[in-house]
Amino acid sequence: MINYRYKINKNNYGNRGMCLEEDINSTNEYYIENDIALIYKKPTPIKATKVSYSNNKNIVINEGFFEKQSTTDYNGIYKGYYIDFEAKETNNKTSFSLNNIHKHQIKHLLNVVKHGGISFIIVRFNSISKNFLLESKFLENFEKENERKSIPLTYFEQYGYPINEKFIPRIDYIKIIDILIKEKTNEKNNI
Amino acid sequence: MINYRYKINKNNYGNRGMCLEEDINSTNEYYIENDIALIYKKPTPIKATKVSYSNNKNIVINEGFFEKQSTTDYNGIYKGYYIDFEAKETNNKTSFSLNNIHKHQIKHLLNVVKHGGISFIIVRFNSISKNFLLESKFLENFEKENERKSIPLTYFEQYGYPINEKFIPRIDYIKIIDILIKEKTNEKNNI
Protein backbone atom coordinates (compact mmCIF):
# COMPACT_ATOMS: atom_id res chain seq x y z
CA MET A 1 0.00 0.00 0.00
CA ILE A 2 1.52 3.27 -1.05
CA ASN A 3 0.28 6.69 -0.11
CA TYR A 4 2.11 8.77 -2.69
CA ARG A 5 0.60 12.00 -1.49
CA TYR A 6 2.11 11.44 1.92
CA LYS A 7 5.49 10.57 0.51
CA ILE A 8 5.69 13.84 -1.33
CA ASN A 9 4.02 16.14 1.14
CA LYS A 10 4.75 15.30 4.74
CA ASN A 11 2.77 18.10 6.34
CA ASN A 12 0.03 15.82 7.68
CA TYR A 13 2.33 13.85 9.97
CA GLY A 14 0.74 14.83 13.27
CA ASN A 15 -2.81 14.28 12.14
CA ARG A 16 -5.15 11.66 13.43
CA GLY A 17 -6.55 9.26 10.93
CA MET A 18 -3.21 8.52 9.31
CA CYS A 19 -3.17 5.82 6.70
CA LEU A 20 -2.19 2.27 7.62
CA GLU A 21 1.27 2.68 6.12
CA GLU A 22 2.02 5.66 8.34
CA ASP A 23 0.61 3.89 11.40
CA ILE A 24 2.88 0.92 10.74
CA ASN A 25 5.90 3.12 10.04
CA SER A 26 5.45 5.01 13.30
CA THR A 27 4.92 1.72 15.14
CA ASN A 28 8.15 0.36 13.63
CA GLU A 29 9.99 3.54 14.69
CA TYR A 30 8.69 2.96 18.21
CA TYR A 31 9.96 -0.64 18.14
CA ILE A 32 13.39 0.47 16.86
CA GLU A 33 13.76 3.33 19.35
CA ASN A 34 12.78 1.07 22.22
CA ASP A 35 15.03 -1.76 21.05
CA ILE A 36 12.08 -4.13 20.65
CA ALA A 37 12.45 -5.10 16.99
CA LEU A 38 14.16 -3.98 13.79
CA ILE A 39 11.46 -3.86 11.14
CA TYR A 40 11.60 -1.43 8.23
CA LYS A 41 9.56 -0.55 5.19
CA LYS A 42 11.49 -1.11 1.97
CA PRO A 43 11.78 1.91 -0.32
CA THR A 44 9.34 1.96 -3.25
CA PRO A 45 11.17 0.80 -6.39
CA ILE A 46 11.52 3.42 -9.12
CA LYS A 47 12.25 2.96 -12.77
CA ALA A 48 14.28 5.94 -13.95
CA THR A 49 13.77 6.40 -17.69
CA LYS A 50 15.51 9.77 -18.17
CA VAL A 51 18.42 11.00 -16.11
CA SER A 52 20.94 13.80 -16.24
CA TYR A 53 23.78 15.09 -14.06
CA SER A 54 23.64 18.13 -11.84
CA ASN A 55 26.53 20.62 -11.61
CA ASN A 56 27.95 18.72 -8.66
CA LYS A 57 27.79 15.48 -10.69
CA ASN A 58 24.86 13.97 -8.82
CA ILE A 59 22.36 12.01 -10.85
CA VAL A 60 19.02 13.77 -11.38
CA ILE A 61 16.01 11.73 -12.43
CA ASN A 62 14.13 13.66 -15.11
CA GLU A 63 11.57 10.97 -15.78
CA GLY A 64 10.71 8.04 -13.59
CA PHE A 65 7.86 5.77 -12.59
CA PHE A 66 6.94 3.94 -9.42
CA GLU A 67 7.15 0.17 -9.77
CA LYS A 68 5.63 -2.74 -7.89
CA GLN A 69 7.61 -4.18 -5.00
CA SER A 70 9.07 -7.55 -6.05
CA THR A 71 8.65 -8.97 -2.56
CA THR A 72 6.68 -7.31 0.26
CA ASP A 73 6.81 -3.87 1.84
CA TYR A 74 8.03 -4.78 5.32
CA ASN A 75 10.66 -7.09 6.76
CA GLY A 76 13.05 -7.34 9.66
CA ILE A 77 13.95 -9.18 12.84
CA TYR A 78 12.22 -9.76 16.18
CA LYS A 79 13.61 -12.00 18.93
CA GLY A 80 15.86 -13.68 16.37
CA TYR A 81 12.95 -14.45 14.02
CA TYR A 82 12.77 -13.22 10.46
CA ILE A 83 9.55 -11.22 10.02
CA ASP A 84 7.97 -10.42 6.64
CA PHE A 85 4.61 -8.88 5.82
CA GLU A 86 2.45 -6.83 3.51
CA ALA A 87 -0.08 -4.22 4.64
CA LYS A 88 -3.22 -3.20 2.76
CA GLU A 89 -6.27 -1.04 3.29
CA THR A 90 -9.70 -1.64 1.83
CA ASN A 91 -12.79 0.54 1.66
CA ASN A 92 -14.97 -2.49 1.12
CA LYS A 93 -17.17 -3.16 4.15
CA THR A 94 -17.51 -6.92 3.93
CA SER A 95 -14.52 -8.37 2.11
CA PHE A 96 -10.90 -7.89 1.03
CA SER A 97 -10.16 -8.43 -2.65
CA LEU A 98 -7.15 -10.64 -3.36
CA ASN A 99 -6.44 -8.38 -6.33
CA ASN A 100 -4.80 -6.13 -3.73
CA ILE A 101 -1.98 -8.62 -3.28
CA HIS A 102 0.06 -9.90 -6.17
CA LYS A 103 0.54 -13.62 -6.71
CA HIS A 104 4.33 -13.29 -6.44
CA GLN A 105 3.89 -11.58 -3.07
CA ILE A 106 1.78 -14.43 -1.73
CA LYS A 107 4.36 -16.89 -3.05
CA HIS A 108 7.08 -14.90 -1.29
CA LEU A 109 5.16 -14.90 2.02
CA LEU A 110 4.73 -18.69 1.82
CA ASN A 111 8.43 -19.11 0.94
CA VAL A 112 9.33 -17.19 4.09
CA VAL A 113 7.41 -19.72 6.20
CA LYS A 114 9.15 -22.57 4.39
CA HIS A 115 12.52 -21.04 5.31
CA GLY A 116 11.59 -20.78 8.98
CA GLY A 117 10.35 -17.19 9.16
CA ILE A 118 7.09 -15.59 10.26
CA SER A 119 4.94 -13.94 7.59
CA PHE A 120 1.47 -12.45 7.41
CA ILE A 121 -0.67 -9.66 6.00
CA ILE A 122 -2.16 -6.75 7.93
CA VAL A 123 -5.47 -5.59 6.48
CA ARG A 124 -7.38 -2.49 7.52
CA PHE A 125 -11.12 -2.27 6.82
CA ASN A 126 -11.44 1.51 6.67
CA SER A 127 -15.22 1.63 6.81
CA ILE A 128 -15.41 -0.19 10.15
CA SER A 129 -11.99 0.96 11.46
CA LYS A 130 -10.77 -2.56 12.08
CA ASN A 131 -7.29 -4.04 11.52
CA PHE A 132 -6.50 -7.72 11.26
CA LEU A 133 -3.31 -9.72 11.14
CA LEU A 134 -3.74 -12.87 9.05
CA GLU A 135 -0.98 -15.49 8.91
CA SER A 136 0.18 -16.57 5.46
CA LYS A 137 -0.99 -20.14 6.03
CA PHE A 138 -4.61 -18.94 6.28
CA LEU A 139 -4.13 -16.89 3.13
CA GLU A 140 -2.94 -20.08 1.44
CA ASN A 141 -5.80 -22.14 2.86
CA PHE A 142 -8.35 -19.62 1.67
CA GLU A 143 -6.96 -19.67 -1.85
CA LYS A 144 -6.95 -23.47 -1.92
CA GLU A 145 -10.48 -23.89 -0.62
CA ASN A 146 -12.25 -21.05 -2.38
CA GLU A 147 -13.06 -20.09 -5.92
CA ARG A 148 -13.86 -16.49 -5.07
CA LYS A 149 -11.17 -13.88 -5.22
CA SER A 150 -12.03 -11.88 -2.13
CA ILE A 151 -11.71 -12.87 1.52
CA PRO A 152 -14.83 -12.10 3.54
CA LEU A 153 -14.50 -10.07 6.74
CA THR A 154 -15.86 -13.08 8.63
CA TYR A 155 -12.79 -15.10 7.56
CA PHE A 156 -10.54 -12.46 9.14
CA GLU A 157 -12.70 -12.53 12.28
CA GLN A 158 -12.41 -16.31 12.43
CA TYR A 159 -8.75 -16.91 11.53
CA GLY A 160 -7.08 -13.53 11.98
CA TYR A 161 -6.07 -11.53 15.01
CA PRO A 162 -7.65 -8.10 15.56
CA ILE A 163 -5.20 -5.24 16.21
CA ASN A 164 -6.73 -2.33 18.06
CA GLU A 165 -5.34 1.12 17.35
CA LYS A 166 -3.64 2.88 20.24
CA PHE A 167 -1.97 6.23 20.62
CA ILE A 168 1.59 4.83 21.00
CA PRO A 169 2.43 2.56 19.30
CA ARG A 170 -0.41 2.93 16.82
CA ILE A 171 -0.60 -0.68 15.60
CA ASP A 172 1.01 -2.87 18.24
CA TYR A 173 1.27 -5.99 16.06
CA ILE A 174 4.33 -7.38 17.85
CA LYS A 175 2.11 -8.76 20.63
CA ILE A 176 0.51 -11.01 18.06
CA ILE A 177 3.92 -12.14 16.80
CA ASP A 178 4.60 -13.21 20.40
CA ILE A 179 1.60 -15.54 20.14
CA LEU A 180 2.84 -16.87 16.77
CA ILE A 181 6.32 -17.51 18.21
CA LYS A 182 4.79 -19.41 21.12
CA GLU A 183 2.77 -21.57 18.71
CA LYS A 184 5.88 -22.16 16.60
CA THR A 185 7.90 -23.25 19.64
CA ASN A 186 5.10 -25.56 20.81
CA GLU A 187 4.92 -27.15 17.35
CA LYS A 188 8.66 -27.71 17.44
CA ASN A 189 8.44 -29.36 20.85
CA ASN A 190 5.39 -31.36 19.73
CA ILE A 191 3.25 -30.08 22.58
CA MET B 1 27.20 0.27 -3.32
CA ILE B 2 25.18 1.54 -6.24
CA ASN B 3 26.16 1.25 -9.86
CA TYR B 4 23.76 3.75 -11.38
CA ARG B 5 25.02 3.16 -14.87
CA TYR B 6 24.08 -0.48 -14.62
CA LYS B 7 20.67 0.28 -13.23
CA ILE B 8 19.82 2.45 -16.20
CA ASN B 9 21.53 0.53 -18.96
CA LYS B 10 21.33 -3.22 -18.53
CA ASN B 11 23.09 -4.18 -21.75
CA ASN B 12 26.22 -5.44 -19.98
CA TYR B 13 24.44 -8.23 -18.12
CA GLY B 14 26.21 -11.15 -19.72
CA ASN B 15 29.67 -9.67 -19.46
CA ARG B 16 32.47 -10.92 -17.28
CA GLY B 17 33.81 -8.54 -14.74
CA MET B 18 30.41 -7.50 -13.43
CA CYS B 19 30.39 -5.23 -10.43
CA LEU B 20 30.03 -6.67 -6.94
CA GLU B 21 26.38 -5.61 -6.73
CA GLU B 22 25.52 -7.58 -9.85
CA ASP B 23 27.50 -10.60 -8.68
CA ILE B 24 25.60 -10.59 -5.39
CA ASN B 25 22.25 -10.06 -7.11
CA SER B 26 22.82 -13.00 -9.44
CA THR B 27 24.01 -15.11 -6.51
CA ASN B 28 20.84 -14.22 -4.60
CA GLU B 29 18.73 -15.14 -7.62
CA TYR B 30 20.50 -18.51 -7.66
CA TYR B 31 19.73 -19.01 -3.96
CA ILE B 32 16.07 -18.08 -4.47
CA GLU B 33 15.60 -20.26 -7.57
CA ASN B 34 17.21 -23.23 -5.83
CA ASP B 35 15.26 -22.69 -2.63
CA ILE B 36 18.43 -22.16 -0.61
CA ALA B 37 17.76 -18.73 0.87
CA LEU B 38 15.54 -15.67 0.38
CA ILE B 39 17.86 -12.70 0.28
CA TYR B 40 17.04 -9.56 -1.72
CA LYS B 41 18.55 -6.18 -2.43
CA LYS B 42 16.36 -3.35 -1.24
CA PRO B 43 15.37 -0.79 -3.87
CA THR B 44 17.39 2.43 -3.86
CA PRO B 45 15.39 5.14 -2.08
CA ILE B 46 14.35 8.07 -4.26
CA LYS B 47 13.24 11.51 -3.23
CA ALA B 48 10.70 12.72 -5.77
CA THR B 49 10.65 16.53 -5.80
CA LYS B 50 8.41 17.14 -8.83
CA VAL B 51 5.63 14.83 -9.96
CA SER B 52 2.75 14.92 -12.39
CA TYR B 53 0.06 12.53 -13.57
CA SER B 54 0.04 10.69 -16.88
CA ASN B 55 -3.11 10.34 -19.00
CA ASN B 56 -3.89 7.03 -17.32
CA LYS B 57 -3.54 8.69 -13.90
CA ASN B 58 -0.21 7.09 -13.01
CA ILE B 59 2.28 9.23 -11.15
CA VAL B 60 5.24 10.41 -13.22
CA ILE B 61 8.36 11.63 -11.44
CA ASN B 62 9.62 14.76 -13.23
CA GLU B 63 12.42 15.47 -10.82
CA GLY B 64 13.95 13.11 -8.32
CA PHE B 65 17.18 12.26 -6.58
CA PHE B 66 18.75 9.06 -5.30
CA GLU B 67 19.00 8.94 -1.51
CA LYS B 68 21.12 6.96 0.93
CA GLN B 69 19.72 3.68 2.22
CA SER B 70 18.62 4.15 5.83
CA THR B 71 19.66 0.61 6.74
CA THR B 72 21.71 -1.71 4.50
CA ASP B 73 21.30 -2.90 0.94
CA TYR B 74 20.65 -6.60 1.53
CA ASN B 75 18.54 -8.63 3.93
CA GLY B 76 16.59 -11.84 4.08
CA ILE B 77 16.34 -15.30 5.60
CA TYR B 78 18.51 -18.40 5.53
CA LYS B 79 17.78 -21.57 7.56
CA GLY B 80 15.49 -19.54 9.79
CA TYR B 81 18.17 -16.91 10.51
CA TYR B 82 17.75 -13.24 9.74
CA ILE B 83 20.60 -12.15 7.45
CA ASP B 84 21.64 -8.52 6.90
CA PHE B 85 24.64 -7.08 5.08
CA GLU B 86 26.20 -4.28 3.12
CA ALA B 87 28.48 -4.76 0.09
CA LYS B 88 31.19 -2.37 -1.05
CA GLU B 89 33.97 -2.24 -3.62
CA THR B 90 37.24 -0.40 -3.24
CA ASN B 91 39.95 0.45 -5.75
CA ASN B 92 42.44 0.93 -2.94
CA LYS B 93 45.06 -1.84 -2.93
CA THR B 94 45.88 -2.00 0.76
CA SER B 95 42.91 -0.77 2.78
CA PHE B 96 39.17 -0.15 2.88
CA SER B 97 38.06 3.31 3.97
CA LEU B 98 35.33 3.36 6.59
CA ASN B 99 33.96 6.45 4.84
CA ASN B 100 32.36 3.91 2.48
CA ILE B 101 29.97 2.79 5.20
CA HIS B 102 27.80 5.23 7.09
CA LYS B 103 27.74 5.27 10.87
CA HIS B 104 24.01 4.53 10.96
CA GLN B 105 24.63 1.46 8.79
CA ILE B 106 27.26 0.11 11.18
CA LYS B 107 24.89 0.79 14.08
CA HIS B 108 22.16 -1.09 12.22
CA LEU B 109 24.45 -4.09 11.57
CA LEU B 110 25.36 -4.26 15.27
CA ASN B 111 21.69 -3.95 16.24
CA VAL B 112 20.92 -6.95 14.05
CA VAL B 113 23.40 -9.05 16.04
CA LYS B 114 21.84 -7.83 19.29
CA HIS B 115 18.45 -9.02 18.08
CA GLY B 116 19.77 -12.47 17.22
CA GLY B 117 20.52 -12.08 13.52
CA ILE B 118 23.64 -12.54 11.42
CA SER B 119 25.22 -9.44 9.88
CA PHE B 120 28.40 -8.61 8.01
CA ILE B 121 29.95 -6.63 5.20
CA ILE B 122 31.26 -8.00 1.91
CA VAL B 123 34.19 -5.99 0.55
CA ARG B 124 35.78 -6.42 -2.86
CA PHE B 125 39.32 -5.19 -3.43
CA ASN B 126 39.10 -4.55 -7.17
CA SER B 127 42.82 -4.17 -7.75
CA ILE B 128 43.65 -7.65 -6.41
CA SER B 129 40.29 -9.28 -7.31
CA LYS B 130 39.66 -10.46 -3.77
CA ASN B 131 36.37 -10.53 -1.83
CA PHE B 132 36.06 -10.80 1.92
CA LEU B 133 33.16 -11.34 4.29
CA LEU B 134 33.79 -9.58 7.60
CA GLU B 135 31.40 -10.09 10.52
CA SER B 136 30.00 -6.97 12.18
CA LYS B 137 31.70 -7.79 15.47
CA PHE B 138 35.12 -7.41 13.83
CA LEU B 139 34.00 -4.14 12.28
CA GLU B 140 33.04 -2.99 15.77
CA ASN B 141 36.32 -4.25 17.28
CA PHE B 142 38.33 -2.44 14.65
CA GLU B 143 36.53 0.84 15.30
CA LYS B 144 37.03 0.48 19.06
CA GLU B 145 40.71 -0.37 18.88
CA ASN B 146 41.87 1.92 16.11
CA GLU B 147 42.12 5.61 15.52
CA ARG B 148 42.52 5.29 11.77
CA LYS B 149 39.50 5.36 9.53
CA SER B 150 40.44 2.66 7.08
CA ILE B 151 40.69 -1.07 7.60
CA PRO B 152 43.90 -2.56 6.22
CA LEU B 153 43.69 -5.52 3.85
CA THR B 154 45.67 -7.53 6.41
CA TYR B 155 42.79 -7.12 8.90
CA PHE B 156 40.41 -8.69 6.37
CA GLU B 157 42.92 -11.49 5.78
CA GLN B 158 43.17 -12.12 9.51
CA TYR B 159 39.55 -11.79 10.65
CA GLY B 160 37.49 -12.08 7.48
CA TYR B 161 36.58 -14.98 5.22
CA PRO B 162 37.75 -14.92 1.59
CA ILE B 163 35.03 -15.57 -1.01
CA ASN B 164 36.37 -16.85 -4.29
CA GLU B 165 34.46 -15.95 -7.44
CA LYS B 166 32.89 -18.82 -9.33
CA PHE B 167 30.83 -19.06 -12.47
CA ILE B 168 27.59 -20.07 -10.72
CA PRO B 169 26.85 -18.77 -8.17
CA ARG B 170 29.29 -15.88 -8.56
CA ILE B 171 29.83 -15.08 -4.87
CA ASP B 172 28.86 -18.14 -2.86
CA TYR B 173 28.75 -16.39 0.51
CA ILE B 174 26.17 -18.72 2.02
CA LYS B 175 28.86 -21.31 2.78
CA ILE B 176 30.44 -18.81 5.12
CA ILE B 177 27.08 -18.17 6.79
CA ASP B 178 27.00 -21.91 7.47
CA ILE B 179 30.22 -21.51 9.44
CA LEU B 180 28.79 -18.53 11.32
CA ILE B 181 25.63 -20.48 12.18
CA LYS B 182 27.74 -23.34 13.50
CA GLU B 183 29.72 -20.94 15.69
CA LYS B 184 26.49 -19.36 16.91
CA THR B 185 25.02 -22.76 17.84
CA ASN B 186 28.22 -23.79 19.62
CA GLU B 187 28.21 -20.53 21.61
CA LYS B 188 24.62 -21.23 22.60
CA ASN B 189 25.47 -24.74 23.76
CA ASN B 190 28.62 -23.45 25.48
CA ILE B 191 30.86 -25.80 23.57
Image (cartoon, coloured by chain):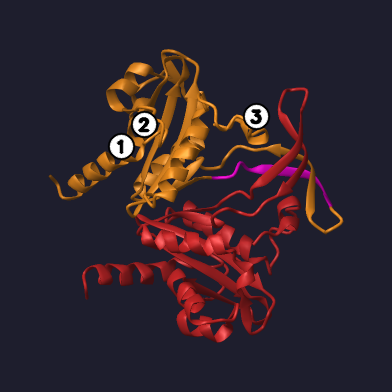
Chain colours: A red, B orange
Tell me what residue is drawn at x 68 percent, y 79 percent: A92
Q: Around disc 1, counting alpha carbons within 10 Å, would you say few (fewer than 14), some (14 to 19), or many (20 or more)?
A: some
Q: Chain of mark 3?
A: B
Amino acid of disc 1: Ile
Residue B96: horizontal and vertical position, in percent? Answer: 44, 20
Tell me what residue is drawn at x 59 percent, y 81 percent: A148
Amino acid of disc 3: Arg
> Would residue B174 be found to the left or right of residue B99 on screen?
left
Question: Magenta part of the protein: which range?
Answer: B42-53
Residue A135: horizontal and vertical position, in percent? Answer: 45, 71
Q: Which residue is mark 1?
A: B176
Viewer can see residue A83: yes
- Cβ–Cβ under 8 Å for marks 1 and 3: no
The quarter of the rendered structure image containing the C terminus of chain A is bottom left
Residue B111 falls in which quadrant of the image?
top left
Indicate the secondary structure of the residue bearing disc 2: strand
Disc 2 with disc 3 on a shared chain: yes
Which one is earlier in the sequence, the residue at label 1 or at label 3?
3
> Would residue A177 be found to the left or right of residue A40 on screen?
left
Q: Nearer the viewer, mark 2 or mark 3?
A: 3
Viewer can see residue A172: no
Q: Which residue is mark 2?
A: B133
Which one is earlier in the sequence, the residue at label 1 or at label 2?
2
Residue A152: horizontal and vertical position, in percent? Answer: 58, 83
> Would residue A55 be found to the left or right of residue B144 on screen?
right
Q: Chain of mark 1?
A: B
Q: Nearer the viewer, residue A186 or B175?
A: B175
